[in-house]
Image (cartoon, rainbow, N blue to C red):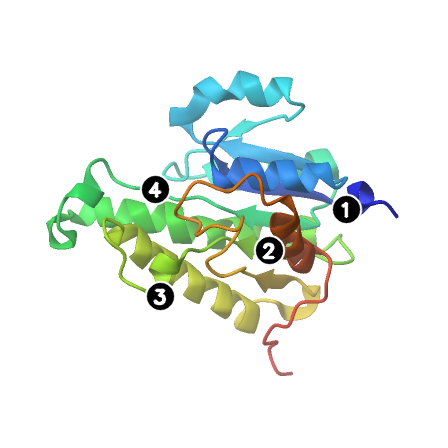
Amino acid sequence: MSASQLLADKRGLVLGVSSRDSVGFHTAEELRSHGADVNVTLRPSSSGFMAELADAGYAPLELDALAEGSVQRAVRQVGERFGRLDFLVHTLVHVPDGALGRPLTALSAREFADAMEVGVRSLLVAAEHARPWLEKSSSPRIVALLSGGADFAMPNYHVVGMVKAALSAAIRYLARHDSGPTGVRRRHPGDRVFGQPAVQQPDRRSVAGRWRILQELLLKQPTTTRRKR
């Protein structure tokens, strides 16, 4: 099988495309380059990118993770379109306006809650509503992309680092407690996605490095902690 067909017949959704330089967009492009059918969601503030995505062959869906029902609706629409989901990739993040230029202690309760809602709870909502479609796959995967800021204090990254740490914990608990009889495996690739820390602009030149990580996440049998029966 040629490299371009390694993900032939795989179908999935990437949550969190915002621009051509976003990790979500490059993830979707990498998956498609190896034969997968991929759809993407786009934040409302990036709606100007919608036409470009459509021209590239996507059927992008607008998703506002702060609006009740938006995540559920996007997952349902893609599930109905594809008939099943083999993978769900989460790259959603929200940085309150000006937050990274202020002390962490200066964030309001609303700003902090919004960052956690988009960056963490949206994964839980998506996982729950994707379950019927993932159960139809022979090798379902849920993948979340993290960054080094989850483990180390990085300059001008405070609230995002806290969100990524919570996201990492969410993936661990999903894998341990919520895999159940469906066989869904949850993985995250740590802090390196495209040969660069995820907080930086992806290195589009490192094709081999990018694909090795996606190959492990979506093709190889992952090691996860399963619930004891």
Element assignment for label 2: strand
Q: Quadrant of residue 151?
A: bottom left
Element assignment for label 4: loop
The structure residue drawn at horizontal position 57% and vertical position 55%, both measured from the top left corner, is: 143
* Amino acid type, label 1: Leu
Find disc 2 in the rendering and name its residue: 142
> Which is in the foreground here, disc 1 or disc 4?
1
> Which is in the foreground here, disc 3 or disc 2?
3
First in residue order: circle 1 vs circle 4: 1
Residue 9 shows up from this direction = no
Find disc 4 in the rendering and name its residue: 94
Q: Quadrant of residue 128?
A: bottom right
Q: Which mark is residue 90?
A: none
* Cα gap from disc 4 to disc 3, whole angstroms: 19 Å
Residue 51 shows up from this direction = yes
Residue 57 in the image: x percent, y percent?
67, 23
* Amino acid type, label 2: Ile
Find disc 1 in the rendering and name its residue: 7
